[in-house]
Image (cartoon, rainbow, N blue to C red):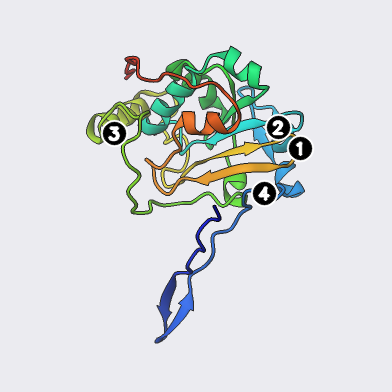
Amino acid sequence: MAAPARVPVTRQVSGRAAPAPAASGPERGQPLAAAVAELPVLDASGRRVPFGALFRERRAVVVFVRHFLCYICKEYVEDLAQIPPSFLQEANVSLIVIGQSSYHHIEPFCKLTGYSYEIYVDPEREIYKRLGMKRGEEIASSGKSPHVKSNILSGSIRSLWRAVTGPLFDFQGDPAQQGGTLILGPGNNIHFIHRDRNRLDHKPINSVLQLVGVEHVDFTRPAVIHV
């Protein structure tokens, strides 16, 4: 079934209606621009890797998180960590997380979440910007996430505690930046792209895994909440 036509939103400027600015960035079915594929991400040792090299040879699920102190991102990545390696191997798919902090925060974040797959950072948020990831919170109902275990009060307190007790007192990224999920590769093919409208708008993991032929994962088992 064809997708419904998108109705442009208008805003009032000097007494007349003017079209709202369109979201920038590529869409599904479009190739990733070579200039974006060449932009660097950093690994846990600070080594620069071209973004496009991460999915040049095979498909990859690439998850951009808000920032490493975000309790929602932390709990989402904790569930990503539960995906059995054999599930990804059977589908010949890579799993990649990208944050926007200093690379020094990668190792502590992986230790905190138990995440052992590929992870990089884009400290200047240049790839976030070029992919059209939103900045700021859009008021929209995103429903209850199967991956968020904490309420906003307890989650925010834990995030603040990690900020003030960490070796580097920072927010580990721009707090206003939103993330998103893409399915990319092989090469610069974009098979799927979702830009989060707010902190709760991430795609359920199994709905993304289904698109790349990865077996369903049971995330209902109790999770340990780390401070």
Q: Amino acid at mark 2?
A: Phe
- In terms of sequence position, does the residue under pointer 2 or pointer 4 come before the other? 4
Q: CA distance from mark 3 to mark 4?
A: 37 Å
Q: Are marks 3 and 4 in contact (CB under 8 Å)?
A: no
Instruction: Identify the residue shown where x is 42% and y is 36%.
Output: 171
Q: Say what secondary structure mark 2 lies in.
A: helix
Q: In the visual, does 132 lie left or right of 140?
A: right
Please tell me how crowded label 1 is: few (under 14), some (14-19), or many (20+) other residues with Cα within 10 Å. some
Q: Amino acid at mark 4?
A: Gly
- For label 1, the residue is 187
- Disc 2 or disc 4, which is closer to the eye? 4
- For label 2, the residue is 55
Q: Say what secondary structure mark 1 lies in.
A: loop
- In terms of sequence position, does the residue under pointer 1 or pointer 3 come before the other? 3
- Disc 1 or disc 4, which is closer to the eye? 4
Instruction: Identify the residue shown where x is 56% and y is 52%.
Output: 132
Q: Amino acid at mark 1?
A: Gly
Q: Say what secondary structure mark 3 lies in.
A: helix
- For label 3, the residue is 156
Q: Residue furthest front?
A: 1
Q: CA distance from mark 1 to mark 2?
A: 6 Å
Q: CA distance from mark 1 to mark 3?
A: 39 Å
- In terms of sequence position, does the residue under pointer 1 or pointer 4 come before the other? 4
